Amino acid sequence: MGKRGWPKGKPRKKIETIRPQIIEERVEIPKNSIKEKIEALHFIRIYDLRLIPRYLFEQVKPQNFDLNEVYAMARNFERDPLTLLYALADESHKIKGFLWCHLNTILKTVDVQVFTVDKEYQDRGRIISKAKEFVAPLNEKTGYRLRGITSRPKALSRFGFKETGEVIVEMEVEK
């Protein structure tokens, strides 16, 4: 016997192996499109700001508030009947965004303080349309105008928002 177990002196026969022919069909597992994901989100009224994941507050730009103070004062917000706080939750009830509004009964406005959503759900304004649809019945019921402060007015103009004649001014306080 030779090294490889063949008898010495006899020629080796080439052994053909039959390999099954693999047909490559790409079967894609259907993933939820961003549109379907956004449609699956639903608004839930909540009364405690502390339920909102910190990263959602942190992604708000420009951030002109101290996040620790917001969480520390959360009890004050939940007691105010004019503060409207809604979580935007997915099918498994995980908070993926939130809408924080305040009813201004003197100016007759619904002032959007913060609207933010997980980056996974940000897509060409579909989420803004969803929020606008959600707030529309409140506007119809109260007759109040919807207002908000943004650093991107042109982006919101596609959804029917327009710049008003009002300008926000600030005065620096000397320390």
Image (cartoon, grey):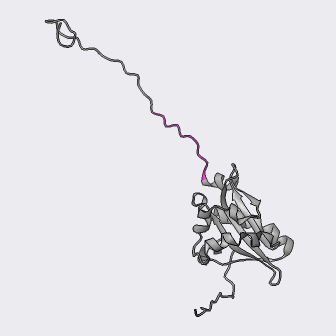
Magenta stretch mostly in which secondary structure? loop
Q: Position of residue 22 (x, y in %)?
A: 42, 28
Q: Is residue 27 magenta?
A: yes
Foreground residue, 175 or 138? 175
Quadrant in the picture for the N terminus: top left
Q: Quadrant of residue 35?
A: bottom right
Quadrant in the picture for the C terminus: bottom right
Q: Position of residue 81 (x, y in %)?
A: 83, 72
36 on left or right of 44:
left
Residue 35 visible: yes
> Farthest right residue?
141
> Farthest bottom residue?
174
Q: Residue at x 71, y 74 (%)?
A: 112
Foreground residue, 165 or 42? 42
Q: Quadrant of residue 163?
A: bottom right
Q: Give the extent of the magenta segment.
A: 24-33
